[in-house]
Image (cartoon, rainbow, N blue to C red):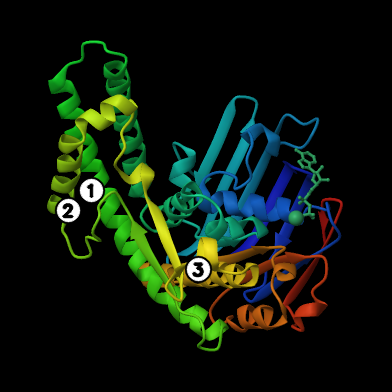
């Protein structure tokens, strides 16, 4: 997949821009606070459906303006495509090739990208919610139906939690209603389980290969799915998984009622990351953790290729300074068939020649 251009009006500190990209490595070069991350944010919104930065959608509007407009042109195996996104007052407009899309989530699945930002170190160091978020965003790009599935799951979860909370307070509750929400929840949970399990399996295979290369064969990485079940259900089909969830809910009713929330399900899942058989979160050094994140990001691209037949676009925001010379070289050596858009203050360190250099100064790109 190739990003051909990004255009923006009144987006963050960008009054107006039209950036064209080369098919190879593109470097966004500039001092701090000039607009590099803003451009990457604007592009990545088309992959993820919303910003990767926290905050309100209205924060994206340039200070003092009424709204913003962004668009990208990209080429995939179906041909050339155009995605547009704008916010003015209460109006939100999202279009693909001129056709209206209903919500932000309908953007997801067309333009696909792997994002790598310094905060991604939290993939290893942070809590399970960081890893679930990563999984959800990544899986959605290849299986857009996952978004609706996850939403349905969350809404069933809220309903079930409301009953449990009610029961916790000693009120009378309807047993049949609780049972029927357990049934609905297990159904959604089992679909999510299978998609996550299979995705992590693929991710683990590639991430392991990448880390072996990065570490010259010294470090073995394994990713596995940590779910509500004691045993890994590696080959189980969906019906069995659904049955297992139902059993958990049935056997733990007293515990869940005294907690007032659902204690089992995909909302509690995690990816267990192990380096040489030890949990990376507690045992890996800072440098090893960086390599692991790098390996996972590269693996995400490989899984993308396996699932869709084309590489996603790699958006790397200010990560070169996070990596030492060897790792920078390793990353940048992986360019075949891949488009990379990388930002930084200084790229001499990497000892590489980008195909295109775009200078960024006060929201202008040249
Ligand atoms: N909504 C906004 N309107 C105008 N400027 C903004 C807005 N949001 C952020 N900025 C400005 O954008 C600049 C940061 O740009 P950023 O792309 O993060 O910089 P960098 O080049 O270091 O990646 C800051 O000066 C910030 O004040
Ligand atoms: Mg930045």
**Residue under the image location 30 percent in, 43 percent down:** 265
**Which residue is denoted by mark 1 in the rendering?**
190
Q: How far apart are the two marked residues, 3 and 2, measured between alpha carbons?
A: 27 Å
Instruction: Name the element at disc 2.
Output: helix
Using the rendered image of the protein, determine whether residue 100 is visible from the camera's viewpoint.
no
Please state, as top left, top right, bottom left or bottom right, where the C terminus lies in the image. bottom right
- The residue carrying mark 3 is 296
- The image quarter containing residue 302 is bottom left
For mark 1, give the secondary structure: helix
As helix, strand or loop, the secondary structure at mark 3 comes to helix
Q: For the point 68% across and 83% down, which residue is it?
A: 326
Expressed as whole percent of the image width and height from the top left, the position of residue 235 reads 19, 65
Looking at the image, the residue that sits furthest to the top is 171
Query: Sequence-wise, which precedes: disc 1 or disc 3?
Result: 1
Q: Mark 2 points at which residue?
A: 238
Specify which label sits upstream in the sequence, 3 or 2.
2
């Amino acid at each position: 997949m190739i990003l051909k251009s990004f255009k923006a009006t009144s987006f963050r500190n960008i009054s107006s821009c039209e950036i064209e990209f080369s098919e190879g490595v593109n470097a966004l070069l500039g001092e701090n606070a000039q607009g590099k991350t803003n451009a990457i944010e604007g592009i990545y919104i088309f992959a993820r459906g919303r910003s990767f930065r926290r905050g309100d959608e209205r924060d994206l509007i340039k200070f003092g303006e009424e709204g913003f407009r962004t668009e990208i042109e990209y080429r995939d195996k179906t041909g050339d495509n155009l995605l547009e996104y704008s916010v003015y007052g209460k109006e939100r407009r999202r279009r693909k090739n001129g056709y209206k899309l209903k919500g932000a989530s309908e953007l997801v699945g067309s333009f696909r990208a792997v994002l790598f930002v310094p905060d991604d170190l939290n993939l290893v160091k942070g809590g399970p919610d960081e890893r679930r978020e990563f999984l959800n965003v990544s899986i959605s790009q290849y299986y857009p139906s996952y978004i609706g599935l996850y939403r349905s799951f969350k809404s069933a979860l809220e309903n079930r939690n409301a009953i449990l909370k009610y029961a916790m307070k000693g009120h009378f509750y309807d047993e049949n209603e609780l049972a029927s929400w357990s049934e609905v929840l297990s159904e959604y949970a089992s679909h999510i389980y299978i998609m996550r399990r299979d995705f992590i399996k693929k991710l683990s295979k590639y991430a392991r290969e990448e880390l072996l290369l990065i570490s010259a064969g010294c470090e073995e990485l394994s990713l596995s799915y940590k779910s509500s079940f004691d045993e890994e259900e590696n080959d189980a089909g969906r019906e069995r998984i659904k049955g297992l969830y139902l059993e958990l809910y049935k056997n733990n009713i007293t515990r869940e009622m005294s907690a007032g929330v659902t204690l089992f399900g995909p909302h509690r899942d995690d990816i267990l990351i192990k380096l040489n058989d030890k949990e990376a979160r507690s045992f890996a050094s800072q440098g090893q953790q960086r390599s692991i994140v790098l390996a996972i990001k590269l693996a995400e691209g490989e899984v993308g290729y396996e699932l869709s037949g084309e590489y996603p676009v790699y958006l790397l925001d200010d990560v070169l300074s996070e990596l030492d010379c060897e790792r920078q070289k390793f990353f940048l050596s992986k360019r075949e068939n891949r488009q990379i858009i990388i930002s930084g203050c200084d790229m001499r360190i990497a000892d590489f020649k980008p195909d295109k250099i775009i200078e960024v100064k006060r929201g202008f790109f040249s």
